[in-house]
Amino acid sequence: REAEEAMEAETAVTMQADGDVVTQHSKRYLVPRSHWPDYACDEHDGRGWEVQVLRFERRRSKLWALCHFVHAATQDGTPYSDEWRQFAHLLPMCKDSHALPRRTATSAE
């Protein structure tokens, strides 16, 4: 719940009648490379792919984020498709730079 409250404080959100949370001005995050270790990642020193969260949805008591890849594309230039990822697994990007804050623990499924 703390991560969700922090996200809401930093993001303009609108609650819909069905309980979904839709972002209007979402922050950027990284999807860790460990989510797809077989794919090359040339973003952020190989740490992960930069995404913008388009919307949030609660599923089985976990918060999920629909992620839009900002830079990632296939070899022929086709942008990666949007993907649902567990919000707790995303790495927040610092506002001032492209560096990532240290994270002491990650939640496991």
Image (cartoon, grey):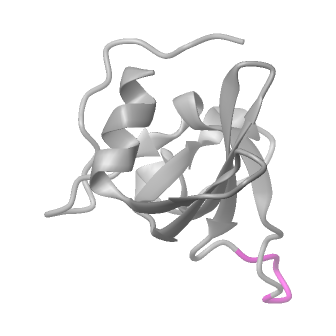
Q: Is residue 17 above or below residue 42?
A: above
Which percent across, then down, holds residue 89?
57, 30
Which percent across, then down, holds residue 3?
40, 29
Quarter of the image with the N terminus in it:
top left
Quarter of the image with the C terminus in it:
top right
**Residue at x 71%, y 36% (from the top left corner):** 35
Camera-side residue: 44 or 28? Answer: 28
Left/right placement of residue 107 relative to residue 12 reads right
Camera-side residue: 73 or 92? Answer: 92
Camera-side residue: 89 or 55? Answer: 55
**Residue at x 53%, y 64% (from the top left corner):** 23
**Residue at x 64%, y 10% (from the top left corner):** 108
**Residue at x 81%, y 20% (from the top left corner):** 60
Quarter residue 4 falls in: top left
Which percent across, then down, holds residue 85?
71, 42
Query: Outermost residue, bottom direction?
Result: 77
Q: What span is colored magenta in the figure?
A: 73-77
Q: Is residue 35 above or below residue 104?
A: below
Which percent across, then down, holds residue 63?
64, 33
Helix, strand or loop: magenta stretch: loop
Left/right placement of residue 47 relative to residue 10 reads right
Q: Is residue 93 above or below residue 25?
A: above
Give the number of marks. Answer: 0
